[in-house]
Structure formats: structure tokens, C-alpha cells
Amino acid sequence: MTQVTIDRLGYQGDGIAQGPLYVPGTLPGETVTGTPDGQTLRDVRIDTPSSDRVKPPCVHAKSCGGCQLQHASDGFLADWKAGVVRNALLAHGIEAEIRPIETSPPLSRRRASFSARRTKKGALAGFHMKASDVVVSIPNCQLLHPDLTAALPMVEQLAVLGSSRKGELSVLVTKSEVGLDVAVTGGKPADTALRGALAKIADEHDLARLCWDDETLLRRRPYQIFGNARVTPPAGSFLQATAEGEAALQRAVLSIVDGATHVADLFSGSGTFALPIARTAAVHAVEGEKAMIAALNEGWRMAEGLRRVTCEARDLFRNPLLPEELKRFDAIVIDPPRAGAEAQVAEIASIRTPKVAHVSCNPVTFARDTATLLAAGYRLDWVQPVDQFRWSTHVELVASLSLDI
Ligand SMILES: C[S@@+](CC[C@H](N)C(=O)[O-])C[C@H]1O[C@@H](n2cnc3c(N)ncnc32)[C@H](O)[C@@H]1O
């Protein structure tokens, strides 16, 4: 047995002691005893708990791999996530005003990807156990919106019907404005009998849409509301994880582009930012997924009272918007995937756009891309962290960058 003191929390959520020795489930300042296994301490006993240690609010916290940090207080997590953003910027020598984090409440996740397997008695749906492909049942999950928790028996019915004996179904369930939107992958190929049974389940649970791999059963058009517009994102496509997180991101973005008349929304998805901005400015939305940009375009066409929105499907990694295309905008919103937007940001750095709203789900690539903009003369006004994934190690943010013209 070895006793160690935890120095810091790593980016994967493990406590780190000298070595480095990784100690899951621990917090900085704690003294713990366990058995070293390579670089990990196992069978850990907490000798001196941190004052930030709390009783996990969820009864599934020990077994379920969905949350890593339920043993930490809300205050600790808020400071730690702000620190992750601050340290990523400091690694590039950048200091910034970091605003207080906006954390989504418990029971607010409006979409979840469940795993489901057949069992001897029927089926089991839930999340994977920590570092395992075993599925654990999560009827009292503290993350999920109650509509999603209530969908677990339906997900199990889907597995009984259409999962192979040893395979696992992946079932993405999204709460839309008019009922659940369900997308299943990994099941048996649909034949006539399975199609009939799926239709019955969709009726019984009043699902808005049920997609089985490439086949779609549409009972009602599921939609999300972005600004004034009703948009039906393609099944399985990106959507902000909580309504509260989405609203926090939108508030920050709208405050940055306030007063602009021509806005580019790059990596626009289905219009989370483009459509609210279109209440006051013309928008050019660019997105790699054709079906998402088509959904945005249709949402705009059916909405009333919006300025003009033009839409372009384009790969912004290989084919970023060039300075002659960008110079007509007085504000740019950019919200890339985790890899960041190195190529596109290099083009933005070479023009003089007064305002850039940079949304990011990865502080490391955000800091790299911000360094490029600062080197070109932009100023980093503030950073607003947003936590849609409470009790996890994820953090998202919106940053305001500007140029004095
Ligand atoms: C973090 S999401 C943001 C979407 C949208 N702004 C929102 O908030 O709903 C990133 C988006 O970038 C798109 N994307 C990923 N790689 C891309 C690429 N190479 N070119 C253009 N868009 C891409 C994804 O399809 C996704 O919609």
C-alpha cells in the first residue's frame, strides 16, 4: 500500500500525485492510500478528504461512466473549469478576463446517446460502466431531462426487437418541441416484420421521429426553436446539449455581434446562432454537413420577420472562406469542432473584421487559434465559460475578440 497526496486534477478528471501517479475519484489536497498499478493507484481509500468533497448526488455515480466528477462541489468545479480555460490561454502567454461560468442545472440534458443490449430477461439500456463496455441501468440519472429518463424502457423495447444477441444498439434520444426524436444505429437490418414492430413502438410512445439506420419513420416533424425559427435538425446531427447551455452561448454571441449588419456564421450547424442573429442582421451561414445547412435554410424560409440568410455547404478545413469573401462582414461567428479552425482563423487574421465571436468546446485549440488572432492585432475582450456537461471534465466557451477600425 502507498500513501500519496493529490497535487492537482488532470484534464481527464483523475487526481494526480507526484510521479505522476493517477488516482481516480480524488481531489487536490487529499491524502489517499492505495495499491500502485503502473501509473494508476487502485483500491483507493481517502485518508484526508478535501473540503470540496461532496456526497455524489446520483445513486449511479459509482458504477456509471457518464460522470467523472460527482464527488466535487459545484464551486470547485466552476473554479476548476475556469482554470482549464485560463491555463490553456496562459500556455500561449495570453491573459484574459474570464467571466463567471454558466452551468446548466441537473436534469437538463435534452439529448443522450444510450447503449442497449439484450439480456436473458429482455434488455438493458443505459450508459457504459467506467472504462468498460458493460451497460449499467440509470433510472435515477441526475443529468438527463425527465423525458429522456422516461424513454429508457422504450430504448429497451427497441433492443429486444432489433439488437443482435451479442451486439449493442446505440440509441440517440433528443427532446424536441413536439416529442422525442430517436435515431438508432447498430441494429439488425430492417425487414417488414421489424418495420411493423417499430411503427408500433413509435405509436405507443408517441415518438415524433424514429430513424433505424437509414430508414425514417416520421410521425411529426420534430423541431427545435432557434430565435424565431423552427428547425428540424437531421437525425443524429449536432445540437447543443442543454437548452440552458444553448441560451447562454446565444446570449454571449448576440452581445458580441450586437450592432453588426452583415454577419458570417462559420460552422453554423442547423442555425443555433445564425437564426437568432437574423432578427437584426443579414447572415451568411457556412457548414460542412449539407443536410444541416438545408435544415437551416428551410427553418429560415418558414420563419417570419428575419433578415436575409444565405447558406453554403463547404468544408472549412480544406476550403476556408478567403479574405475577399470575408471582408464584407462586420462580425464573424466561428464555432468549430474540437480540432479548432486553424485554416479558417489564418484567413480571418489577414482581414480586419471589427468583431469575432469565437465559440469553442476545446480550450486547447481555442487558445492556439486565439494566439493567431492576437498576433494579427485582435484584442481578447473577455471569455465566457459555459458548462453544459456538469460533473464531467468538458467545458465550452464564447470569446469576444475585436479590432479597433
Ligand atoms: C460544435 S458544432 C457547432 C454547430 C453550431 N454552431 C451549433 O451551435 O449548433 C461544429 C459544427 O462544425 C461542423 N463541421 C465539422 N467539420 C467541418 C468542416 N471541416 N467544415 C465545415 N463544417 C464542419 C459540424 O458539422 C458541426 O455542425
Image (cartoon, rainbow, N blue to C red):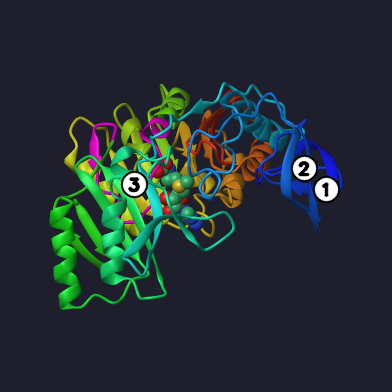
**Is there a contact, CB below 8 Å, between mark 1 and mark 2?**
yes
Picture residue at 31% right of the left edge, 75% below the top: 188
Residue of label 2: 16
Picture residue at 24% right of the left edge, 48% below the top: 180
Can residue 39 be seen from the camera position used here? no
Front tag of 3 and 1? 1
What x and y, as percent, mark residue 29? 77, 30
The residues colored magenta run: 226-246
Picture residue at 84% right of the left edge, 40% below the top: 4
Front tag of 2 and 3? 2
What x and y, as percent, mark residue 310? 31, 45
Secondary structure category for the residue under label 3: loop
Q: Label 2 is placed on what type of residue?
A: Ile
**Is there a contact, CB below 8 Å, between mark 2 and mark 3?**
no
Residue of label 1: 20
Disc sitting over residue 270 in the figure:
3
Can residue 20 be seen from the camera position used here? yes
Q: Is mark 1 within 8 Å of ligand 1?
A: no
Q: Determine the main secondary structure of the stretch shown in magenta.
A: loop
